[in-house]
Image (cartoon, rainbow, N blue to C red):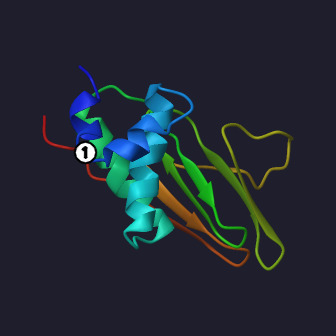
């Protein structure tokens, strides 16, 4: 399957200005389009992942977006972990980079929304087959 049908929903100028014409660039363009329409970061990621997963089943869609204060991330088909030190920091990574026992795995098909003070995990619904 192809993501070509999803590209039709983006302005042609947006597609033509992309420096890299690959799947990840298209996924970013879909997220960016939602952000420019006013979607919150976490919602933009979640909606994009669900749309792409429906168009291209079997996709691995671990996405990460930060505005400097918060982190939004999706675990979809691959591992994702977080380390939270409330009030200090939250780290999100594909795999733990040290042996700190406080690393927590994000369940597959989950949206993570994190700040310095808390981490919220929200299950993402599988698109219909």
Left or right, 82 with reference to 78: right
Question: Is residue 29 at all visible to an observer of this figure?
Answer: yes
Taking the spot 40% from the left edge, 73% from the top edge, the residue there is: 38
Left or right, 91 with reference to 4: right
Give residue 9's position: percent from left, percent from top.
24, 47
Seen in the picture, residue 128 relative to 65 is either above or below; the reply is above
Taking the spot 38% from the left edge, 61% from the top edge, the residue there is: 34
Quarter occupied by residue 16: top left
Question: Is residue 123 at all visible to an observer of this figure?
Answer: no
Q: In terms of depth relative to the viewer, which is nearer, 74 or 20?
A: 20
Q: In terms of depth relative to the viewer, which is nearer, 81 or 3?
A: 3
Taking the spot 57% from the left edge, 36% from the top edge, the residue there is: 79
Left or right, 94 with reference to 87: left
Q: Which residue is mark 1?
A: 126
Task: Report the quarter where the N terminus lies.
Answer: top left
Give residue 124's position: percent from left, percent from top.
34, 54
Seen in the picture, residue 105 relative to 94 is either above or below; the reply is below
Seen in the picture, residue 30 relative to 122 is either above or below; the reply is above
Label 1 secondary element: loop
Callout 1 environment at 10 Å: few (<14), some (14 to 19), or many (20+)? few
Give residue 10's position: percent from left, percent from top.
31, 47
Residue found farthest to the top = 1
Taking the spot 45% from the left edge, 64% from the top edge, the residue there is: 35
Task: Report the quarter where the C terminus lies.
Answer: top left
Give residue 19's position: percent from left, percent from top.
57, 32
């Amino acid at each position: 399957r192809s993501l070509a049908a999803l590209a039709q929903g983006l302005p042609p100028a947006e597609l033509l200005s992309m420096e890299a014409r690959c799947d990840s660039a298209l996924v970013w363009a879909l997220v960016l389009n939602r952000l420019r329409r006013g979607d919150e970061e976490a919602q933009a990621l979640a909606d994009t992942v669900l749309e792409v997963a429906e168009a291209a089943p079997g996709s691995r869609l671990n996405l990460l977006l930060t505005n400097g204060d918060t982190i939004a991330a999706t675990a979809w088909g691959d591992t994702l972990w977080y380390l939270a030190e409330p009030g200090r920091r939250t780290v999100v990574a594909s795999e733990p980079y040290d042996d700190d026992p406080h690393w927590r795995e994000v369940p597959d098909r989950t949206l993570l929304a994190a700040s310095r003070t808390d981490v919220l995990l929200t299950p993402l619904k599988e698109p219909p087959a």
